[in-house]
Image: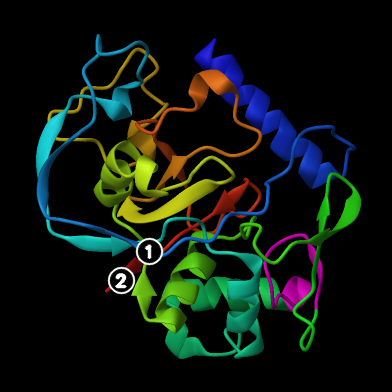
Amino acid sequence: MFHEDRQGEALVQLAQMLGVSWSCPLPAAQVMRPALWLPSSQWQLGRSAGQGGFSVDNEQPPYSVAVPEFEIDAQLVTWAQYVEFVQDGGYDRADLWQPQGWQWLQTQAQGEGRRCPRYVEQMGASSGAVTQTLFGKAMRMQSTQPVMHVSWWEADAWCRWAGRRLPAEVEWDLAAHTASRRGFAWGEALEWTGTTFRGYPGFQSGPWREHSEPSFGSHKALRGASFATRPRLRDPAMRYFLQPERDDAFTGFRSCAL
């Protein structure tokens, strides 16, 4: 059932790619709250096979991690925040991009003149208005809606421009489990982290060996859930993983202080 749920989300992504009309609740405007400070702590990342229901191999086994104090955004980066990056020449400054990311951007620019996230049809230089095509329909984005359909390279470049960084996977996990009452909000878009996707210490591949192991070291870890995620999969411990250039999924991000 969990596998079918994930494939169902993939079908929604495919509908977006093909411009097929789809009726589902889209990301809502966010309540803007101050960033959250979390003290240093010892945190258990992962879960055992029999702990609280189903889990896949890349979420096992649990292990303890020492997490230094950190500050993390209470919500995802918004369109208003991302527009500032674009207006400041973020897509034209090689110093903001990792070398592989800059190479990816140049390849994209040759094909489509890329200067904004995928499916964005209009981004006003003066007004800040953003129009993004969702399921075949051009829609005006609200300023506090989360940025969506960004690659890891774009998320990382925005953080460099803002003087911040993407959260480590363990930081996101700790905040999602302990800071929800303080305003940590998630569930509108899958969230890029700064962590390269690997198995936890003691990892053992499950029956579907190709699910996780071939992606170790080459993919980036994502957390959270998107508006298209089925309720059964909405678990803060759930791990996702994509190559850094992927922007077809419903991906967004938040940032941490350096």
The number of numbered badges drawn on the structure is 2
Quarter holding the N terminus is top right
Asked whether disc 2 touches disc 1, contact meaning CB atoms under 8 Å apart, the reply is yes
Q: Earlier in the sequence, mark 2 or mark 1?
A: 1
What separation in Å lies between label 2 and label 1 (alpha carbons)? 9 Å
Measuring from the top left, give residue 34's x and y in whole percent: 41, 65
- 57 versus 257 height, above or below: above
Q: Residue at x 45, y 60 (%)?
A: 254
- 2 versus 72 height, above or below: above
Front residue of 242/43: it is 43
Q: Which residues are magenta?
A: 110-123
Q: Is residue 3 left or right of residue 147?
A: left
Pair 2/1: label in front: 1
Q: Which mark is residue 72?
A: none
Q: Residue at x 30, y 48 (%)?
A: 169
Can residue 130 be found in the magenta stretch? no
- The amino acid type found where label 2 is placed reads Ala
Residue 66 appears in the rendering:
no
Task: Read off the residue under disc 1.
Answer: 35
Residue neighbourhood size for the residue with mark 2, other residues' Cα within 10 Å, grouped as few (<14), some (14–19), many (≥20): some
Task: Read off the residue under disc 2.
Answer: 257
- The amino acid type found where label 1 is placed reads Ala
Measuring from the top left, give residue 96's x and y in whole percent: 45, 84
Front residue of 220/22: it is 22
Secondary structure state at the residue bearing disc 2: strand
